[in-house]
Image (tube, helix red, strand yellow):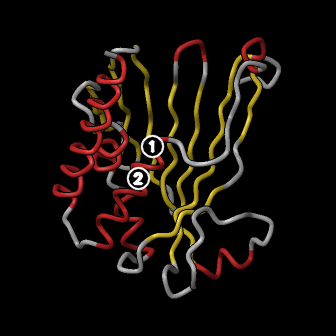
């Protein structure tokens, strides 16, 4: 992407505590399971996700929803996962999810922990989110990247909490996520009626 034609805006880096029951390796295994992450990002039946593995470390997705379609790519990294979504009008969202331990957190004094635990004993592993949006220059003045979690991150943190605190397997956790997503969808419908 030429920097003359596109402009990139970034949100501040966010840290989300992971339950003590999950280790760094455990969180990495979850992030490296592209199918599990995709089912977490898009739990609703109204969003049809077509998956195509292009290599051992990269998976491409086509998401068809009532609002339109988008293309997404997930790539495994040593520290987590790189996610890129191509949206209508030439917008491109990039999210990097990494795993950090408390020692890594202590080294980065200039970043703020989201939902900081009350003591270090509560959590020693963090999910780190780095997010940006690239847009064509004419549209870039209309793009506003807000700090704080987006829906995909909320769902991923919810999944990590379910897997860590309750010891559920991923199928049970995804069923719970689908049920809560359906409840939120039904609430939105009743408000519109």
Could you tell me which secondary element the residue under label 1 belongs to? Answer: helix
In front here: 103 or 2? 103
Q: Is residue 161 above or below residue 87?
A: below
Crowding at mark 1 (Cα within 10 Å: few <14, some 14-19, many 20+) = some
Q: Is residue 66 above or below residue 29?
A: above
Left/right of residue 25 with respect to residue 35 in the rendered view? right
Residues at badges 1 and 2 in contact (C-beta under 8 Å)? yes
> Any mark on residue 152, and which?
1
The percent position of residue 37, horizontal first and vertical second, equals 35, 48
Q: Is residue 181 above or below residue 88?
A: below
Residue at horizontal 30 percent and vertical 22 percent from the top = 189
The percent position of residue 116, horizontal first and vertical second, equals 60, 70
Q: For residue 58, what is the image quadrant?
A: top left
Left/right of residue 38 with respect to residue 3 in the rendered view? left
Residue with the mark numbered 2: 156
The quarter in which the N terminus is drawn is: top right
The percent position of residue 41, horizontal first and vertical second, equals 37, 41
Could you tell me which secondary element the residue under label 2 belongs to? Answer: helix
How many numbered tags mark residues here? 2
Residue at horizontal 67 percent and vertical 45 percent from the top = 147
Residue at horizontal 78 percent and vertical 16 percent from the top = 137
């Amino acid at each position: 992407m030429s920097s003359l034609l596109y402009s990139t805006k970034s949100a501040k880096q966010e840290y989300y505590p992971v339950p003590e029951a999950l280790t760094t390796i455990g969180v990495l295994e979850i992030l490296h399971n592209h199918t599990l992450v995709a089912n977490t990002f898009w739990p609703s039946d109204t969003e049809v996700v077509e998956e195509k593995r292009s290599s051992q470390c990269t998976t491409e997705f086509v998401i068809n929803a009532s609002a339109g379609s988008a293309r997404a790519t997930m790539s495994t990294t040593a520290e987590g996962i790189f996610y890129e979504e191509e949206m209508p009008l030439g917008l491109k969202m990039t999210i990097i999810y990494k795993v950090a331990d408390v020692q890594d957190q202590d080294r980065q004094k200039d970043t703020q922990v989201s939902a900081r635990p009350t003591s270090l004993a509560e959590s020693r592993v963090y999910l780190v989110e780095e997010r940006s949006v690239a847009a064509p220059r004419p549209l870039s003045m209309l793009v506003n990247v807000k700090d704080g979690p987006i829906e995909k991150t909320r769902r991923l943190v919810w999944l990590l909490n379910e897997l860590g605190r309750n010891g559920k397997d991923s199928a049970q956790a995804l069923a719970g996520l689908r049920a809560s997503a359906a409840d939120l969808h039904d609430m939105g419908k009743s408000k519109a009626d």
